[in-house]
Every structure is written in structure tokens, then in C-alpha cells.
Image (tube, rainbow, N blue to C red):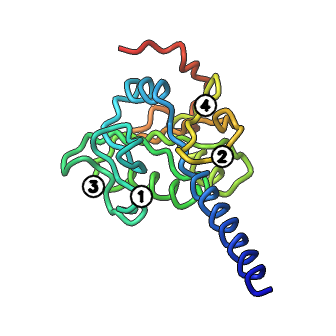
């Protein structure tokens, strides 16, 4: 009888471990290469604020273990000219938008532009507080098909919810309200 209880307990633990690993992996979807190439070239990006070695858009990046939210300056050097890509974990946007906005208006003036991949969420606190202060809000067409992490069981073909880019510039082109348009990114030429 004790053996059966132990086996049932073991199976429950295995199922819980599997569920926890699948949950962790769900947040680790990678930006697809075809989109990464065109967004990097369009904005001349040179720094990735939330990446790892396998999915960074640029050579200079902040990894999850380095914790971008605790780093004071998102810049590739002590000079001005950082052009930052940010595809934050899609669990809690507010602290990421607070940090992105802080970086672009900071007195150190090292960050020229931050391009943030986001889920349009017009009624959320982070959207009302930060997206409306952006220079541009760019709807993406077609939807970006993200790459699932290795080991994630999924029948999903790319986690294809609507996405947009929110662009913050140190020197805004549209100081009153964000410019809003649709970018047909697959029509962009790769150079």
C-alpha cells in the first residue's frame, strides 16, 4: 500500500514539475529572425535590453541574470547614441515601461531611442501612463509569429496575438501625441 502512495506522490510531483517548466518556458518565446532583421535595420538598433545569448538582436545586451530593471543605464557605452530594442517578458509590462521611459528622458542622455514590442492594451495602467507619452505607436501587419522555446509542448503556431511597437525618442518628432500607423514589416527590404 505504501508503494502505491509513493508512486502516486511521485507522479503528482512529476506532473507539477512538468507544469512549472512549461509555465516558465511560455514566457521565453523568441523574436523570429525575419522580423528581427528588419526591425534592427529600420531603427539601427545597437543594444538589446532584455535578451539572452541565443535571442539577442544585437551584440550588446542585458541578460535575464543581469536584471535589466536593476541596471541604472541601458547603454552600450558611456557615450550617447544607444538605440535600444526591448521585447520585455509579457507578464508585467508596467515596470518595463517605467524603466524604458526613464531611460529615454534621463539626464545621462546616452539613449537616443527605445523601441518596445508590446501587446496593445488600451485600458491597462501601463498603456495609459506610458504608451500615450511615446513618439510613435506602430501596429504590426502581419502578426509576428514568435518562435517557441525548445521543449515547450504547444500546438500553437507562433503565439500570434496582436503586437505593436512603442517608440520613445530622446528628441520626439511628435511632441503632442504619438503618431500611430501600421507597418507592413514583411514588405521591408533586407539590406
Q: Earlier in the sequence, mark 3 or mark 1?
A: 1
Q: Residues within 10 Å of mark 4 (few under 14, many from 20)?
A: some
Q: Which residue is mark 3?
A: 108
Residue furthest out toward the left? 78
Secondary structure type for disc 2: loop
Name the disc covering residue 29, or none.
Answer: none
Given residues 9 and 126, the one toward you in this image is 9
Residue behind mark 1: 64
The disc placed on residue 145 is 4
- Distance from the alpha carbon under mark 4 to that under mark 3: 36 Å
Give the labeled residue for mark 2.
153
Position in image of residue 126 (x %, y %): 62, 55
Which label's residue is closer to the chain start, 4 or 1? 1
Residue 98 horizontal/vertical position (percent): 50, 58
Locate the C terminus by quadrant: top left
Q: Residue at x 64, y 58 (%)?
A: 23
Give the structural element (helix, strand or loop) at label 1.
Answer: loop
Question: Quick one: label 2 or label 1, which is nearer the N terminus?
Answer: 1
Q: 144 or 181, which lies in front?
A: 144
Q: Which residue shows up at 71% across the image and 70% down it?
A: 11
- Nearer-the-camera pick, 28 or 7: 7
Q: Secondary structure at mark 4?
A: loop
Amino acid at each position: 500500500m505504501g508503494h502505491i502512495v509513493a508512486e502516486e506522490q511521485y507522479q503528482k510531483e512529476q506532473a507539477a514539475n512538468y507544469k512549472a517548466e512549461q509555465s516558465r518556458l511560455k514566457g521565453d518565446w523568441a523574436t523570429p529572425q525575419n522580423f528581427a532583421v528588419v526591425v534592427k535595420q529600420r531603427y539601427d538598433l545597437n543594444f538589446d535590453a532584455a535578451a539572452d545569448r541565443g535571442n539577442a538582436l544585437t551584440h550588446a545586451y542585458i541578460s535575464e541574470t543581469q536584471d535589466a530593471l536593476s541596471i541604472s543605464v541601458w547603454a552600450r557605452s558611456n557615450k550617447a547614441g544607444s538605440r535600444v530594442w526591448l521585447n520585455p517578458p509579457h507578464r508585467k509590462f508596467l515596470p518595463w515601461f517605467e524603466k524604458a521611459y526613464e531611460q529615454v528622458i534621463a539626464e545621462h542622455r546616452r539613449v537616443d531611442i527605445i523601441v518596445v514590442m508590446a501587446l496593445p492594451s488600451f485600458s491597462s495602467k501601463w498603456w495609459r501612463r506610458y504608451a500615450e507619452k511615446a513618439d510613435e505607436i506602430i501596429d504590426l501587419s502581419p502578426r509576428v509569429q514568435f518562435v517557441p522555446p525548445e521543449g515547450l509542448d504547444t500546438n500553437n503556431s507562433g503565439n500570434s496575438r496582436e503586437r505593436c511597437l512603442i517608440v520613445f525618442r530622446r528628441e520626439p518628432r511628435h511632441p503632442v501625441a504619438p503618431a500611430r500607423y501600421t507597418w507592413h514589416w514583411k514588405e521591408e527590404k533586407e539590406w
